[in-house]
Image: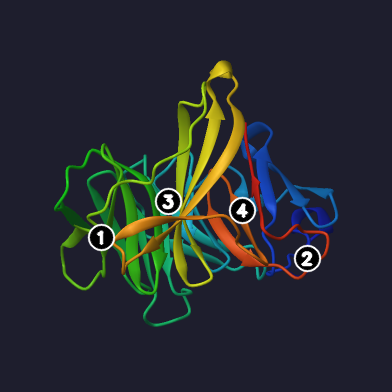
């Protein structure tokens, strides 16, 4: 990073809380970083991010997974160290999620790019991605949300809202139904017909978070409320959560996370979210 002008580098990023970054301008050449603790934004022009799509990631260790607009080239970029790792090219365009399993400096690290019916696997030193197929023991037509927890992949799948899990130990990814209980019962009010769902690891538990919209404004959906449930294995059921204590949940198009936040400017027992 020597001899680089300040506007071509990210702001000094704090790892105890997430930053909101928005790429914009022609060919996504500009980036705006928003610091929620200071209510302040920084405008940058980072050449490594120009002409790049950012994959949605549920586990990243501070790394972004990038794909070039005009080619099949893929990269890992760390916005703290500004280290960039070139990945093998990948021809598929529309992915659901990315999962970085341990930092790329770890010999046991691997990157998963999840598509609708399969995933592509890369490990440090690999010259190409390896395709792995899915098997489900429930009806499946798409992923609603994915996350990782204690070495397992969890997913909420459509059309019936089943939660499935795989330990990623077999050559084929075998998603098995996790609980036999019913889906959470949402307390939807009149006009609240639409929602997005997120699986979020929080304080050692897997939470299912629903972001519920008012149906009156379908052209510009308005967030009405949130409902949270935790997975209770002993009762084989979802249990409603009313309080997340000192933690804070962050939801966006690209990531969903919870943090134990000590900064007094960041509200605890709260949900921060992005909405277009």
In the image, residue 161 sits, relative to residue 194, either above or below, namely: below
In the image, residue 169 sits, relative to residue 197, either above or below, namely: below
* Position of residue 107 measured from the top left corner of the image (x, y, whole percent): 39, 82
Query: Alpha carbon of mark 4 to alpha carbon of mark 2: how far?
Result: 20 Å
- Badge 1 or badge 4: first in the primary sequence: 1
- Left or right, 273 with reference to 114: right
Work out whether residue 129 can be spotted.
Answer: no
Give the SS element for disc 2.
loop
Task: State which quarter of the image contains the N terminus.
Answer: bottom right
In the image, residue 86 sits, relative to residue 81, either above or below, namely: above
Nearest-to-viewer mark from 1 and 4: 1
Residue pictured at 58% horizontal, 25% vertical: 221
Which residue is under mark 1?
A: 178
- Left or right, 154 with reference to 74: left
Disc assigned to residue 250: 4
Which residue is under mark 2?
A: 12
Give the SS element for disc 3.
loop
Which residue is under mark 3?
A: 73
Residue that lies at the very extreme toward the bottom in this rendered image = 107
* Position of residue 253 measured from the top left corner of the image (x, y, whole percent): 53, 43
Nearest-to-viewer mark from 4 and 2: 4
């Amino acid at each position: 990073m020597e001899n680089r002008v300040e506007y071509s580098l990210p702001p000094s990023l704090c790892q105890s809380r997430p930053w909101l970054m928005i790429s914009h301008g022609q060919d996504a050449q500009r980036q705006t970083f928003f610091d929620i603790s200071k209510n302040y934004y920084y405008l940058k022009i980072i050449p490594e991010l120009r002409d790049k799509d950012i994959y949605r990631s549920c586990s990243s260790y501070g790394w972004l997974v990038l794909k070039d607009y005009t080619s099949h080239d893929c990269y890992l970029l760390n916005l703290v160290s500004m280290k960039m790792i070139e990945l093998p090219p990948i021809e598929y365009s529309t992915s659901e999620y990315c999962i970085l399993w341990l930092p790329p400096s770890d010999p046991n690290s691997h990157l998963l790019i999840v598509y609708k019916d399969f995933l592509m696997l890369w490990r440090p030193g690999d010259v190409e991605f390896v395709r792995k197929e899915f098997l489900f023991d429930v009806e499946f037509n798409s992923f609603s949300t994915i996350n990782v927890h204690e070495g397992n992949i969890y997913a909420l799948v459509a059309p019936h809202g089943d939660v499935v899990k795989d330990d990623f130990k077999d050559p084929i990814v075998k998603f098995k139904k996790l609980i036999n209980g019913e889906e959470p019962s949402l307390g939807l009010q009149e006009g609240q017909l639409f929602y997005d769902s997120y699986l979020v690891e929080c304080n050692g538990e897997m939470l299912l978070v629903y972001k519920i919209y008012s149906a009156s404004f379908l052209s510009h959906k308005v967030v009405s409320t949130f409902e949270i449930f935790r997975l209770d294995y002993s009762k084989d059921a979802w249990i409603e959560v009313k309080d997340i204590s000192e933690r804070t949940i962050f939801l966006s198009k690209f990531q969903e996370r919870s943090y134990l936040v000590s900064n007094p400017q960041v509200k605890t027992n709260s949900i921060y979210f992005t909405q277009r």
